[in-house]
Amino acid sequence: MDLISGISVALIAGSISSHVTTEHEPLNGYNQNHKSIGFEVVQDKEGITNGVQAFKFKDSFNKNSFSTLYSLGYTKRFKSLSVRSGGAIGYVDTSYYNGVVAMPFVGVMYKRVGADLGFIPKVKGGDAVLSLQFKFKLN
């Protein structure tokens, strides 16, 4: 069995977000179309799946930011389409919040192109954020 058998690797390239709360009121130049790049590694199977993500992005104030997440989800396959839902926990480092985040998510992958929709609840010092992330499966 080779090293990546049963593992899916995806390139994270771009995301859109919206601050649901307004503790950090949008300023001139406020950015909700994030320039992001990173990778996701997820078990490639139906059923309960584990995954990790690491990506760099420009936050809503155009500052360099970084995030790492561990996810636990459930994947269901329908021919060329797979749907994964679950939760993720990790660390985020932005210009206005550094710390632990937890979020529910739902993701869809059609052949090699996919997207994840996640919701980060409000935490002290941060806003609640709705995020849509775009992925491209590499293997």
Image: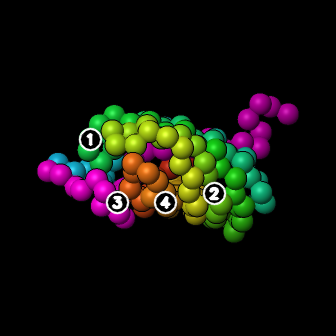
Question: In this orientation, which residue lies closer to the viewer: 44 or 23?
Answer: 23
Determine the secondary structure under disc 1.
loop
Res. 99 visible in picture:
yes
Name the amino acid, label 4.
Answer: Pro
What residue range appears in magenta?
1-28
Task: Report, in whole angstroms, how far the alpha carbon at label 2 lies from the one at label 4.
Answer: 12 Å
Query: Residue 126 at x, y = what percent?
Result: 39, 51
User: Mark 3 against mark 1, which lies toward the viewer?
Assistant: 3
Name the amino acid, label 3.
Answer: His
Task: Report, in whole angstroms, how far the alpha carbon at label 1 lies from the one at label 4.
Answer: 21 Å
Q: On the image, which quarter does residue 8 sit in?
A: top right
Give the residue pinned by disc 1: 62
Name the amino acid, label 1.
Answer: Asn
Give the residue pinned by disc 2: 87
Callout 4: 10 Å neighbours few (<14), some, many (20+)? Answer: some
Determine the secondary structure under disc 3.
strand
Callout 2: 10 Å neighbours few (<14), some, many (20+)? Answer: some
Give the residue pinned by disc 4: 121
Callout 1: 10 Å neighbours few (<14), some, many (20+)? Answer: some
Against 111, is 3 above or below? above
